[in-house]
Every structure is written in structure tokens, then in C-alpha cells.
Image: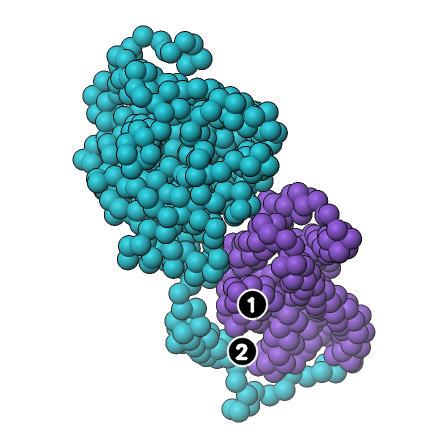
Chain colours: A purple, B cyan
Amino acid sequence: MSIDDFFWLYDLPTHQLALLFVAVFVGFYWIGSILLRPLLRPVVKYTAGANDIVGYVLSCFCVFYGLLLGLIAVTAYQNVADAGANVTREAAALSALYEDASRYPEPYGQNLRWLLRDYTRYVIKYAWPLQQKGVMPEEGTIRAAAVHDQLLEFQPHTPAEQILHAEALRQFNHFLECRRMRLYSVTSSLPASMWFVMILGAVLNIAICWLFDMRFITQLVLGGILAAYLGTMMFLIFDMNQPFRGDVSIKPEAFEALYERMNEG
Amino acid sequence: MRDPHPAPPPSPQVVSRRRALVDGTATTLAAARLLAPALFTGCSLGLPPRARTVKVGMLHSQTGPLGISATGLRDIELHAFERINAAGGLLGHRIEPRAPDPRSRIDLFVRKARELLDDEVACVFGCWTSASRKAVLPLFEEARKLLFYSVQYEGNESSKYVVYGGMVPNQQIVPALDWLMSPAGGEKKKIFLVGSDYVFPRTANYVTKKYLAGKPLAVVGEAYRPLGDRDFAAIVKQVQESEADCVLNTVNGTSNLGLFSALAAAGVDPEKLPVFSTSIAEEELRSLVPAQVRGHYALSCYFQSLDTPANRRWISEFRDEFGFDRVTDDPMEPDWCLVHLWKQAVEKAGSFETEAVRQAFRDGLSFAGPGGMVRLDPKTQHTSKFFRIGRIRGDRQFDVVHSSDAPLAPDPYPQIAFPGWSVDWTTDGITRGPEVKIDGDV
């Protein structure tokens, strides 16, 4: 079993996913309280100040674990932000290339514009739904190659055309870079070892709570609150783990706006 | 010794663990029962229901010399599939198109066709040149899957697993020759045959020579250049020296750029020496220089400039999706019709299975396409269609100068060229006549 086996969770709407994470963590804590607490509590029950000791241990543990979760959450958010920025840069490069294409003599200009529009449409209609399923879209490469072929077909005859062509090729290379980075982001995610450490930490955190000697109902409520927050943090990291998946993911708005402008004539 | 932590005496206010457990479980179950339908609406085991899909292959060159022509086919198929999906799919299945790029290379056509068939597509719409179709045909026959081919071709072929949507010579070249010999066509006397060097031009010209034998229009020359080649200066010189008064052009792909550049450079006047092209349509015109092609002609079953409500609606819908300045053309219109004929057959068969779909052909399917009514002939698995001649305008469109009165029935084995050959897929399949040597003497 790998982390990929849980990617179906991204198909759930965000509120349901959040609820599921909270329910799993709280449920785990409550079931553990019922089943394991009687076994664990005798370890500390007859020690004076045992709750204080468990409390100190929990505090120390929470500091380290909280730091880990915080850093991972920031990294995950940074990944999403970077992927979003790449998408915007790709759309911007495409837009600049489209502008350059309109300066080319016919029929190259029109052919280039048609190909660029075709690429943009493909990204919106076909690539994005695939990305949202965690699949790297492949046919965009064909369309990008068609644009490249068309660019290389053109032979500039005047100094102005040479400058325009050089600029278009530079812009095209920049576009390819951004496109490649977007594609890498489709499958990039936190490594499995990181998930292992996070989940183990959450389990240990909850296990420490089971050691507290207090009224049962109080333990259910207080531990439940902690477990619910742990679940929320895990949900947040999981949701940001894949920039293009889930309800809260990068949308093709930059490409949609560009496509609309391309079709204005 | 006294217990340092005596257990507190039971109090009536303190809830016992057992009671808490029972109450907690009951409350949780009640809450779950109450909230679950609202929270997990539409979910089955936490997953939204997924639509069933059927994969359909699109085998068109998107790059290379033929990319310019074939991408229009890919787009019109995507348009058709998107519309079918938007209307609820086909037999409850969402069509999932697969479009690899054979890059105008025959070896890649074979490889990509094999990949599509291994991917278990229901059928494939594809190929542009006859060379590519012939290369992949054995794969389809072996896999028993249907290939839908929408480009005009030379005939002299029939396969149980191919549905041919384009014109064959008796629907394109023969009526064009008749028109050229008629007063409306200028009663031409000498024709020069120019083509790309592969099976379609060679066979089409063989049919032409056979048909014109003993007729007032004489073939005064025949010349070929490799597919993709653009050096036509020598051929144009040959044409001029032959004193031909018209040219039948079976050149394909970007080679047409070279041919028309050479014609323009040699100062050929379309009024005196018109070129009649079999493989030039609106999609190709966008890459040709208007001044070089204006006044020449194309032989086709469809032109974008056809002024009918159905055609205007079709163009408008295509442009809404693919861009305000996109064009529609001959192979795109038959391709659109083929997708819808396949859809009809699948619906009739209630299955995507090849044999069931082929059985559905037997009842005779027809579709009102943008260029007029199209009927799939179950015997030949070819379609009947209108024949039209268009004169190229300066705006990369055509003026329709001639149209057949009714759709012409297909005949992949015209007896003038292939005596003894015929096909009937509703009974015995292909009846073979004597072998015909295409490059031999006529």
C-alpha cells in the first residue's frame, strides 16, 4: 500500500474530506480510550503526580510535533503557490507568444495563432481534468511540438522579422520551461516517509493522551478536541499535497482568460 | 497501609463510564444517521459516481507535412465527441478520445495504431494518405476493429474493417473529367496529371487514363514528386511545354505550396491553364498564398461556402468551440458524418462490439450532414455523396461552380479500371477480377 492508494480521497468535496479526517482522528482517539485506556492507565495510575508527568511529556512532544506539522504545512503551501505561479507564467508566456504571432506575415501568423489557441483549448478542456485526477496529460506535448514546428518553418527575410522571430523563439522556450514545471507539479507530493513520520507522531500524540488519569467523559472531550485539531492539520496538509487535485486546487483561470481573449478576434 | 489516592465515593452527579459509553454511542449513531445523507450526498463509499467511458482512437498526423491538413479532422472529431458527451454520451458511456501523433510517418502510423488497439479502443477514426491507411489496415483486420477513413481516395480497396467516408474516383475524378469535357467546363482537350508519388495519385491517374481512353480529352503528360517535396519547377516547365489546357493535381500536403509557387513563378494564368486539385480544401488554403491559388479549382463533396442553413449552423457551432476564424472543409464534413453514422450504428446495435456495429450497417444508415444527405452503403461500406467543383477565391474560400444533382453512389472498383472486381459485404465480400498493374500501360 502506498500513499497513492489514498488519492481517491481527493475526489471528495472539501467539507466532506475535512469531516472525514476529523472523524477518523476523533474516532481513533475515542475507540482507543475505550479499548486501550484501561490497559495503559495502570502504568501511571499509582504514581504520584503522574498526570503532571504525562502533561510535561505531551507538551514537549507537541512542541516538536507542532513544529514538524507547521513546517510541512508551509512547504505544502509553498508547493501550491509555486505551481500556481508556474501556471500563471505559462499562460503569460503563451499570451506573449500569441501577440508575437499576430506580427508574423501570413500564412505563418494565422497558423501559429490557430495552433496556440488549440494548445490553450486543450489545456482547459482536456489537460486540466486529467491533472485533477493526478494524471500527467500527454497530448499537450504534441500540440506544443506543432507550434514549435510552425515556428521553425518560418524563414525571416528582413531584420525586423529576424528580431521578431528570435523573440518568439525565446518566448516559446520560456513557455516550454513553465509548461514542463507545471507537468512536474502534477505528480509532485510529499514523500511517503514524511507521511509516515506525521502519522506516527499523531498516533503517539493520541497515545500519550490515553495515559491521563481523569474522568472518562472529560478525557473523551479534551482528547477529542486535540484529535480533531490533529485531523484538521492533517487534512490541510493532505489537501495541499497535490496542487492540482481536490476541490481547493489550482484552477485553469489564467488559461480561460487567455482563451477568451484569443477568441475576441 | 492506606491508599494515598483513595477512590472518590460515587456521586449521583457523576456519569458512570458505562452510561457515558452507551449514551455516547447512541448519540453518535443518531447524529451519523441524521447528518450522513446531507454530508455525503452523491457519494458511494465516499466516492462520487464515475461515468462509464468508451475509448475511441483518433489517428491523425498533428505535426509533419500532413499535420496542416489532418489536424482539422482531429478537431471536428473532438467537436462531435464533445457534443455527444454533452448530450449524455453514447449508450450511457462517455467517449474518451485518444489522439496520438503519427507525425506524418508511416512507421509511426503503424506503431500508434497498435498502441491504440492495445489500449482497447472501440474503433479508430484516422489516416490521411492511402499509404498510411494501407499500412495500418492489417492491424485492424487482425484486431477485428473498425477504422473510419474520411479522406477521398483512389478506390481499388475494400476491407470488412474499414468504413470509407471520402470520395472514390467515380464520385470525384470521373464527374470532374465529364465536366471538363462539357461546355460548362470549357470543353478542354489536353490534360496534364501531376501528383505526389504514392498510391493515391498513381491509382487516381490510372483511373483517369482508363476513363479518358477514346474521349476528346487527351492525357498529354504525367509527373510525380515525392510526398513532402516542394521542387516543382521542372514539372511546371513540362506542363507548359505539353500545351495542356488543364491540370489534374493529386499532390498532397505541404507539397502544394511548392507546386503553386512554381506555377505562379512561371506566370501560369488560371484562366488559360486551370489546375483542378483533388486534395486542396479550405484547411490547405490557409497555408497557400492566396495570389498563387486564386482562380484555380478544387474537386470536393463539400465547401465551407455552401449557403444552406445546416451548413451555416454547423460552421457557427464549430467556430464557437474552436475559434472564430477556423474553417471547415471536405474531409472534415465526411468525418463529421462518419462519427454520426458510427453513433447511429452503435445505438442501433446497443453495443460497441465491431460485429454488432457492422450488423447495424446492413439496414442502411443515413445522416443529414452539413453538405447534404449521406448514406452508408452496406455493400461497399462507402458513402454516397454530392460532387462539387469550387473555384478558389482571394479570401481562401471557394465559389461553387458546379454541383451534382443528387448524391453519387460509391463504386470502389469502377469497371473501366478494375474489370471483374466488386464488393458486397452483406454477402460474399470481395469478388476478385484479374490483377491490375497500376503503373502498367493503359
- Residue at the spot of label 2: B17
Front in this rendered view, residue A152 or B403: B403
**Residue A86 in picture, x, y percent from top left:** 70, 62
From the viewer's perspective, tell me whether residue A80 is left or right of residue B322.
Answer: right
Q: How many marks?
A: 2
From the viewer's perspective, tell me whether residue B313 is left or right of residue B359.
Answer: right
Whether residue A241 is situated above or below residue B32 in the rendered picture: above
**Residue pictured at 24% horizontal, 34% vertical:** B408
For badge 2, the amino acid type reads Arg
Q: Would you identify the image quadrant in which residue A78 lies?
A: bottom right
Chain identifier of the residue bearing label 2 in the image:
B
**Residue B14 in picture, x, y percent from top left:** 55, 88
The residue lying furthest to the left in this view is B363
Q: Would you identify the image quadrant in which residue B134 lies?
A: top left
Whether residue B383 is situated above or below residue B37 in the rendered picture: above
- Residue at the spot of label 1: A261
**Residue pictured at 29% horizontal, 37% vertical:** B184
> Which of labels 1 and 2 is toward the front?
1
